[in-house]
Image (spheres, rainbow, N blue to C red):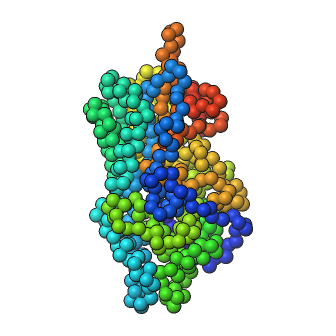
Amino acid sequence: MKRTAPLSVAVAVSLAAGVLCTAGPASARDGSGPRHAGRDLYGTKAPYAPQEKANHYQSPPRGFRPVFTENVARHGSRAMSDGKDGEAVLALLSRADQQDALTGLGEDLGPQVRSLLDAAKALGYGNLSARGAREHRRTALRMEQRLPSLFEKIAAEHEPVLVETSGVARAVASADAFTGGLVSGDPALAGLIGAPVTDKNLLYFHKQPQNADYQAYLAGDPGLAAVLAELDADPRTAEAAHRVVARLFRDEFAATLPAADQVSFARSLHQLFAAAPDLDVEAPDVDLSRFLAPRDAQWFAYLDDAEEFYQKGPAFSGRTITYRMAGVLLDDLLAQAAAKADGSSDKGAVLRFTHAEEIEPLAALMGLHGSTEPAAPGEPYSYPNNPWRGAEVSPMAANIQWDLYADTPSDGRPATHLVRMLYNERETGFKPSCKPVSRGSHFYDLDELKRCLGHA
């Protein structure tokens, strides 16, 4: 949950010089990203874009064919969780309007925010958007196109497809969109895909009683509170907020706003800015990029990324509280692959739909690209010193996919099983302690993964 009313920026807490320098905006990798700005301006609200083209994937070793696939996917693009940010922005705009204190740009903002809120209310706060459904349908079709022989086998041998969700409406809707995409690609799969099964311990573990220690960490860990307060108090936050306010309000009115109120307003506006592309079907005429200069959007996206990093990602060096709970999900990935390999499972695929609170810890636990580096003592997370980016680690519809391959020995020995991992559809190596079948390969022996991915 984003903090839209940060601690007073008047608190004087200094950071090491240069620690929080912002990076320039990165371009979207394809046309499916947000309009008018780089994906890193949107953090974990960035709409989904596949990270590799299918013709760039490695071929499996000779004699191996796909026999099973499984994934873990975040729900797709959605409406914001509630209307609080929009209401806060509209309240200040209304107050200024009554005093004839809006700039021309400021006068344009209110109708845009109202349109966005109306679209979110009509859809239902927190619910999957049309864009989110499209993200999952297209991801499913690309999965089929990558593994045509597997899905032909699933249909021909009537192998069941297990679908599991957190039970939250947007995750269930994402599962429905994904499986609908599979069926549109191959109607023969229709009778093999089971109704979604809710498993909160697996796919909503951050809220379960067994993880009360994690919930206590979020609520009152001194180290977490201190580093977030330190980031909030950086003078550049107040400077960015003042620039935002100065674009929208006349000088006399802006001068009456305390620094903390300016920051709160600017952060709420950034939350709306980041949410708007996810509702581009429901609110096609809304474009908030005019109201935030890229440098200011970048700064507030950085603050959001820092919060995600410390609450759900690699966090503090020497501590595992934010990600060890994802062990249940890693165990299930290994168990489902092993069951297929040893013949105790007849499933053709296992599809799981969850949330950023599960994807980010799993990425950190597995040491996936971008999630390998916790913050060192005395060196708060920043873009220059850490590769973690919300838009890359856990955008909307983020996904981790394992494909299981087997050979067919002619000498009577047991089949060998290999796993290839895709992370947001990019071939991705397992952590360095896992050894691939050959140098530079993205294929790993399943027994090797059981060894190297073990965890306490």
Q: Name the quadrant containing residue 441.
A: top right
Residue plotted at (32% across, 23% down): 156
Residue plotted at (28% across, 64% down): 122
Report whether 7 appears left or right of 147: right
Location of residue 315 with respect to 175 vertically, above or below: below
Report whether 295 appears left or right of 143: right
Residue plotted at (61% across, 26% down): 437
Residue plotted at (63% across, 64% down): 22
Indicate the position of residue 208 as horizontal and vertical percent values: 45, 49
| Residue 43 seen in the current view | no
Report whether 401 appears left or right of 10: left
Viewer-side residue, 282 vs 219: 282
Task: Tell me how many marks there are.
Answer: 0
Location of residue 216 with respect to 91 vertically, above or below: above
Viewer-side residue, 331 vs 64: 64
Q: Name the quadrant containing residue 375.
A: bottom right
Location of residue 412 with respect to 237 vertically, above or below: above
Viewer-side residue, 62 vs 385: 62
Indicate the position of residue 147 as horizontal and vertical percent values: 42, 31
